[in-house]
Amino acid sequence: MKELLKSAYRDMGPVTGLFPSWPCLRCGKTLGAKGGGPDAENYAGTYNGLCYACTAGEPYVESTDPLDGALSLSWRPSRPSWRRDREREIAYADCAVCGGLGRPTAMPYRYVGNYGERVGASCASCRTRRDSHPTRVWAGERDTRIRNAASNIYFAELRRRKLFRAAKAGKADAAVIEAIKAPIVVRYAHAVGRWDKLRAARMGHG
């Protein structure tokens, strides 16, 4: 984890906490260009790769699912004083509830401290429509079966070696546990690889 964080923040100024003046990922504007101290655009704690205008911009379609036309939309942050990440919503162009925007047009408004913020509300109709599609249901169930099969093999091996209780209590020898896991992880990876290809073909992502 330490190495991961070090890699992620390797370009951050150790004193200022600022990333370099990179271009906005959407419009190309130089981030933090106004100067004068830490800026949310390029400050490590609030950085999202976007300038203020693009962060607060209108929703736009990022992708369309070939399976049934479900749209993935990028929305402005609903709580910008807490998180600056743009949010993702699912929508269908013909939805009578949200009009293809992924959120009902009438959104509640509230104050959080001194900040007025719109509270996001995903379109339940679009979410339900997407999640209940037969092919997605089938794929989700198969994902679960593959994970459960790997877990069952692992637990069965622990029981065969009379290590289940010790492992559950965190008292089993770590090297022995890793030796048991290793071949199961390899088999699981192969199974997932084959399954990913089948799923992509069935769902139109191949």
Image (cartoon, helix red, strand yellow):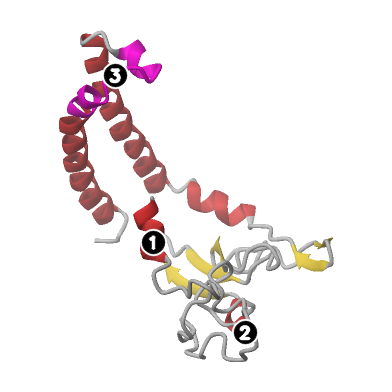
Looking at the image, residue 105 sits to the left or right of residue 189; the answer is right
- The secondary structure that dominates the magenta segment is helix
List the single residue furthest toward the front. 15
Q: Nearer the viewer, residue 84 or 45?
A: 45
Name the residue carrying label 3. Answer: 155
**Residue 175 colored in magenta in the image:** yes
- Asked whether the viewer can see residue 49, the reply is yes
Q: Earlier in the sequence, mark 1 or mark 3?
A: 1
Q: Quadrant location of the C terminus?
A: bottom left
Amino acid type shown at disc 3: Phe
Element class at badge 3: helix
**In the rendering, at what x and y percent does residue 48 appear?**
53, 72
Image mark count: 3
Label at residue 6: 1
* CA neighbours of label 1 inside 10 A, class few (<14), some (14 to 19), many (20+): few
State which region is magenta.
164-180
